[in-house]
Image (cartoon, grey):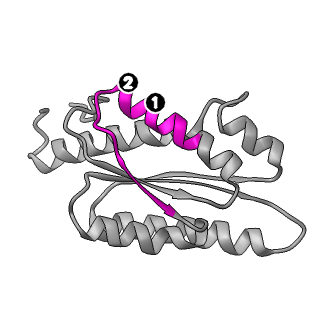
Amino acid sequence: MVIEGNLDGKGLKAVIVLSRFNSFITERLLEGALDALGRHGAASPVIVRVPGAWEMPIVAAELARQKKYDAVICLGAVIRGDTPHFDYVAGNAASGLAHVSVETGVPIAFGLLTTNSVEQAIDRAGAKSGNKGFDAAMTAIEMVNLLRTLRDDGKPA
């Protein structure tokens, strides 16, 4: 037997946590996420804007604890510079979001780009490498459906 989620977004209540930092990238990620949700039948999500990636875990935790949303989609971009700032922000944001997902049981889709250059970020926000915001929304849809199946004793919906 194989148990997996599907990509039916009908009835899905998602919230997007969007970083304002590097907004020229994050707005493109948002467009991709909205496109994915719309194509798969999900309602328009609530969008919560935060200053940057560092602030995402606490906001994602608050939203997940509210139990109003099936999934939290986090979109942001941390681009490496000449200081260790990147390592602290990217690593702690990633581990914080993973912790929130495990602790709350709510899927936290990781659409936080961690790139070495602006060019790489642009590529991942809709240029050469697709749109990672789209991918994060697809992950959210699939994970919500997978968890619904698993929580219903493994019986497909």
Q: Is residue 37 magenta?
A: yes
Question: How many neighbours does mark 2 have within 10 angstroms: few (below 14), some (14-19), or many (20 or more)?
Answer: few
- Mark 2 lies on residue: 39
Residue 119: x, y in percent? 82, 41
Which image quarter holds the N terminus? top left
Question: How many neighbours does mark 1 have within 10 angstroms: few (below 14), some (14-19), or many (20 or more)?
Answer: some
Q: In front here: 43 or 115?
A: 43
Left or right of 155 on screen, residue 142: right
Q: Secondary structure at mark 1?
A: helix
Q: In front here: 73 or 84?
A: 73
Q: Are marks 1 and 2 in contact (CB under 8 Å)?
A: yes
Query: Quadrant location of residue 93?
Result: bottom right
Q: Please, what is the three-letter code of the amino acid marked with disc 1?
A: Asp
Residue depicted at x 73% and y 27%? 128
Q: Is residue 92 magenta?
A: no
Q: Secondary structure at mark 2?
A: helix
Residue 53: x, y in percent? 59, 65
Left or right of 119 on screen, residue 33: left
- Mark 1 lies on residue: 35
Number of numbered markers: 2
Q: Please, what is the three-letter code of the amino acid marked with disc 2?
A: Arg
Write down the region rendered in magenta.
Answer: 29-49
Q: In front here: 44 or 79?
A: 44
Q: Which mark is residue 85?
A: none
